[in-house]
Image (spheres, grey):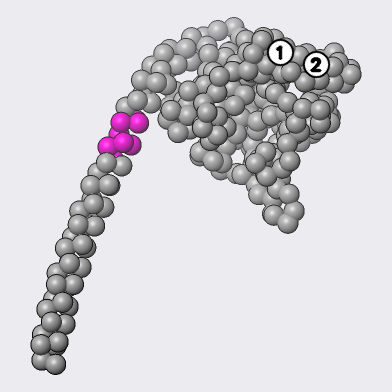
Amino acid sequence: MDDLRAALAHLNEELGQLKEATATSLEGLRAETSQVGGRISQLRGIAAGTFDGIGQLRRDLVAARASAEYEQAFEDPEPLVTIRIPTYVRSKLLVERALPSIVRQTYQNFEVIVVGDGCTNDTAERIAEFGDPRVRFVNLPYRYPYPEDPEHRWFVAGAPGVNVGTELANGTWLAMLNDDDEFEPHHLQLLLDTARSTRSEMVYGNILVRRPPPQSDQVLARYPPVMGWFGFQAAIFMSALRRFEFSTRSWLLDEPSDWNLCRRMIETGVRIGYVDRVVTTYYPSKLWELDRPGG
């Protein structure tokens, strides 16, 4: 019995030593992990500084502010607004939700440029049947080669189409809408009035996130802009800033393309205004059944 007690005591002592050594090792591992994480963050920041081209964008902003197009955005009593919509295979939602919400706007001096990401369905036919001459459709010859990772692909999906829409835009102001979401009727008028009264170069409002029952809806409302609480479908900015494009590589920085663009505007010094009202309703595609080919 004494031998057993001695063996157990020795075993407990060894377990204590092992526990202490393990705790020390874990603490060291945590410290090393924290250091690595901090270094990765620093390297990402360094990469972003080069990747984003902030210096060139600042020069572009200075040039834009000196242009006639810049002053026209504030002085024209009824400026044309170009609404860009990237799309792929959601023709039904496009013509039954997105486009009708634009036509219902209280501000009617707009054009809509729908850019297909290599659409192979009936998008062109449905837009033609919609019958509004202010809406035109341009289809890219092939789908953009997005990243294979689903999250990275979601970060930049539609960015090429928005950029093409910007190139084709005739408007003094630029807006955008996803093909399965909708504007509130006052969207354009409210954002335009706010931009002009405050001489803001970009203005945004709140987003209502519509979720399928029994989930609750949510309003995204933050100022100044914060990642996860901002989207360009709730914003307008002057076309004099058209050099501020949507990045197709922002996934390398672990950022959605619209937040990447907003962050670049912030760092460049774009004058950003805000209105505390819902201007856009967003239907997260991950939660709702998507409109697929033939739908």
Image marks 2 and 1: residues in contact by CB distance under 8 Å: yes
- Which residue lies most toward the top here? 68
Q: Is residue 14 above or below residue 220?
A: below
Q: What secondary structure is found at the residue carrying circle 1?
A: strand
Residue 286: horizontal and vertical position, in percent? 65, 41
**Mark before the other along the chain sequence, 2 or 1:** 2
Residue 16: horizontal and vertical position, in percent? 17, 73
Q: What secondary structure is found at the residue carrying circle 2?
A: helix
**Residues drawn in magenta:** 38-45
The one nearer the camera, 191 or 116, is 116
Q: Is residue 152 above or below residue 10?
A: above
Q: Is residue 289 above or below residue 268?
A: below
Residue type at mark 2? Ala
**Total number of numbered discs in the rendering:** 2
The one nearer the camera, 154 or 44, is 154
Left or right, 21 with reference to 96: left
Q: Residue at x 76, y 33 (%)?
A: 291
Q: Residue at x 67, y 38 (%)?
A: 285
Residue 207 in the magenta stretch? The answer is no
Q: Is residue 191 above or below residue 71?
A: below
How crowded is the residue under tag 2: few (<14 C-alpha within 10 Å), some, or many (20+)? Answer: some
Q: Residue at x 38, y 26 (%)?
A: 48
Residue 239: horizontal and vertical position, in percent? 61, 15
How crowded is the residue under tag 1: few (<14 C-alpha within 10 Å), some, or many (20+)? Answer: some
Q: Residue under circle 1?
A: 139
Q: Quadrant of the N terminus?
A: bottom left
Q: Residue under circle 2?
A: 124
The one nearer the camera, 149 or 173, is 149
Residue type at mark 1? Asn
* Prevailing SS of the magenta stretch: helix
> Is residue 78 visible in this depiction of the protein?
no
